[in-house]
């Protein structure tokens, strides 16, 4: 897995017809700025309910759920 971020500075959400991407920006332990992208698929029953396509770093879960909730999405 990529380096975990010790400080998150920004999150961006990109919505497409068949996926939603969340890009988390911040700094690693080494002080390097980086971005980590998480992919989500809408469920078959509700396009506002998302399933992660991979594992989400536990340090990023709350931030990701909050930014998605602001956009009207729910992670299931």
Image (spheres, rainbow, N blue to C red):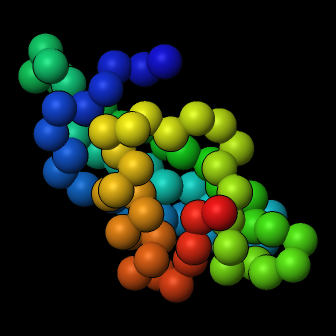
At horizontal 49% and vertical 55% (from top left) the residue drawn is: 22
Q: Position of residue 45 (x, y in %)?
A: 87, 78
For the question of whether residue 33 can be seen, the reply is: no
Q: Closer to the camera, 75 or 20?
A: 75
The total of numbered circles placed on residues is 0
In this view, the residue farthest toward the bottom is 72
Rendered view: 6 above or below 47: above
Rendered view: 22 above or below 73: above
At horizontal 41% and vertical 57% (from top left) the residue drawn is: 64
At horizontal 10% and vertical 22% (from top left) the residue drawn is: 31
In this view, the residue farthest toward the right is 44
For the question of whether residue 29 can be seen, the reply is: yes
Query: Is 38 on the left-hand or right-hand side of 10?
Result: right
Name the quadrant containing residue 16: bottom right
At horizontal 61% and vertical 70% (from top left) the residue drawn is: 15
Query: Is 73 on the left-hand or right-hand side of 46?
Result: left
Rendered view: 43 above or below 73: above
Q: Where is residue 60 in the image (x, y as percent from the top left)?
A: 35, 45
Rendered view: 52 above or below 4: below
Quarter placement of the C terminus? bottom right
Q: Where is residue 30 in the image (x, y as percent from the top left)?
A: 13, 15
Q: Position of residue 71 (x, y in %)?
A: 47, 81
């Amino acid at each position: 897995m990529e380096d975990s971020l010790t400080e998150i500075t920004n999150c961006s959400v990109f919505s497409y017809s068949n996926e939603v991407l969340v890009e988390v920006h911040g700094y690693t332990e080494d002080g390097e700025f980086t971005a980590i992208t998480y992919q989500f698929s809408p469920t078959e029953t509700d396009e506002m309910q998302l399933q992660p396509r991979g594992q989400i770093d536990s340090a990023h879960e709350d931030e990701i759920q909050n930014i998605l909730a602001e956009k009207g999405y729910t992670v299931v």
